[in-house]
Image (cartoon, rainbow, N blue to C red):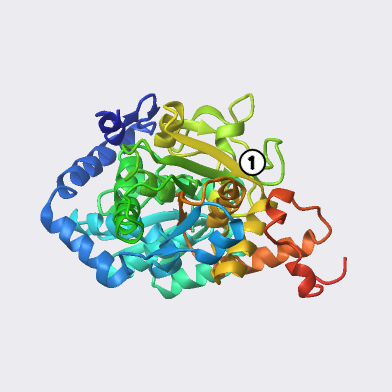
Amino acid sequence: MARALLRPDAQGYFGPYGGRFVPETLMAPLAELSAAYNRWSRKRTFRNELRDILAHYAGRPTPLYFASRLTEKLGGARVYLKREDLLHTGAHKLNNALGQALLAKTMGKERVIAETGAGQHGVATATASALMGLSCTVYMGAEDCRRQRLNVDRMRLLGAEVVPVESGSRTLKDAINESLRDWVTNVRNTHYILGSVLGPDPYPRMVRDFHRVIGDEARRQLKKQAGTYSPDVAMACVGGGSNAIGLFTAFIEDRKVRLIGVEGGGRGETLGEHAARFDGGSLGVLHGTRTMVLQDREGQIAATHSVSAGLDYPAVGPEHVLLRDLGRVEYTHVSDAEAIAGFQLLSETEGLLPALESAHAIAHAAKIVPHLPKRDIVLINLSGRGDKDVESVLEYLAEHQDDAVDPEIAGVSVHPAVHKWGTPRGGQR
Ligand SMILES: *Cc1c(COP(=O)(O)O)cnc(C)c1O
């Protein structure tokens, strides 16, 4: 099974999912990219150069950290965190941006483009472009530009051009549409650095390969630090699914390891109120790939909501759908409220502000870890740091001071933090 899984077929299908659903004009560029990736990713020169950059510039290997206070607090299995929050620019996204930028340069491209939602992938791409002397344009929904001013400023300071996208809902999916349009027009000198395991082949497998260093390292580190290659559980949050697949790939063939992906459950079960594709989604095509999509009965892409911008997307990477079908990975979701509780839990017990995306995995861990034997090991991918989310968290806490909190997580903390600080900004309600 595992071999077939790791290598999609020649058309880029993971079982029935994936493929290349793009306009005719993009078929040749995708074939060119696929051929270049197949060729260079096998060459020692390319691999060594990327490895050096990851080590000396980006900060790999990232640590594996035994979270002893969190473990004690939860009172069950031992919790280890893979510290992607310590990677340069503060999240796992740089692994992929550096890999694709190096590939673009190797292919002789002079310019890269990228889409970005909250701006994290845009910042990673702008960073990789500055490092490699590539010109960089980032498409970002106008609404997202407004919400994430700091990241827009960071990208511009890194020398990138940021283009606000005014069409549609003025968010991530419109930015992807605009990036594809640019790529069609400028494909001769331009490479499109897509930011997750989404889109047409070869992106889902290429982005996964650039991130599998996460799981490969964690496996070796666990052996050194805990005496085993195999955690009992490995878990990660799932937006497009890149940090999760980066962790899971190292453990897929190790059937002892239970794998769990955590989606953004948002603020309710109704379509439009969440980003739980495995719960409320159905099979469809979005941005060039066949996968689980949140859509209405007529096939219109649904609005999504998550307190975490990185999980707020209507589709999921196609390989994840196959892994779900095969029963190899379990997918679940936690609500906005639970994710905020997870954020507070990790902040207060370990001194680590997690990205709100990663806080979803922490929150789910807080639910299951207390029920697991003390000798078990739970490995969580801490995909990014939470400095970018401080404002969102405070806003959330201000708006929800009076809400009841899910007892499963309230038992270990938390929303009351807001009372400690008095009335936050936003003032009287
Ligand atoms: C973008 C992002 C995610 C979600 O993207 P995936 O492709 O699902 O990994 C998760 N965590 C952080 C910190 C991010 O920036």
From this view, report whether residue 126 is shown above or below residue 276: below
Q: Nearer the viewer, residue 191 or 9?
A: 9
Please name the residue that numbered disc 1 is placed on: 303
Q: Residue at x 65, y 68 (%)?
A: 391
Q: On screen, 100 above or below 319?
A: below
Q: Position of residue 273 (x, y in %)?
A: 69, 42
Location of the N terminus by quadrant is: top left
The quadrant in which residue 421 appears is bottom right
Q: Name the spot of residue 142 as percent of width and height, x first.
A: 58, 58
Give left or right: position of 154 versus 185.
right
Quadrant housing residue 282: top right
Residue in the image at 69% along x and 61% along y:
413
Q: Residue at x 46, y 49 (%)?
A: 376
Residue 426, picture quadrant: bottom right
* Helix, strand or loop under label 1: loop
Vertical order, 100 against 417 (above or below): above
Q: Is residue 382 visible?
A: no
Q: Extreme right residue here?
A: 429
Where does the image place residue 259, in percent across and percent down from the top left? 44, 41
> Total of numbered circles in the picture?
1
Q: Quadrant of the C terminus?
A: bottom right
What is the crowding at mark 1: few (fewer than 14 residues within 10 Å), some, or many (at least 20)?
some
Q: Considering depth in this image, is 13 or 154 the residue closer to the camera?
A: 13
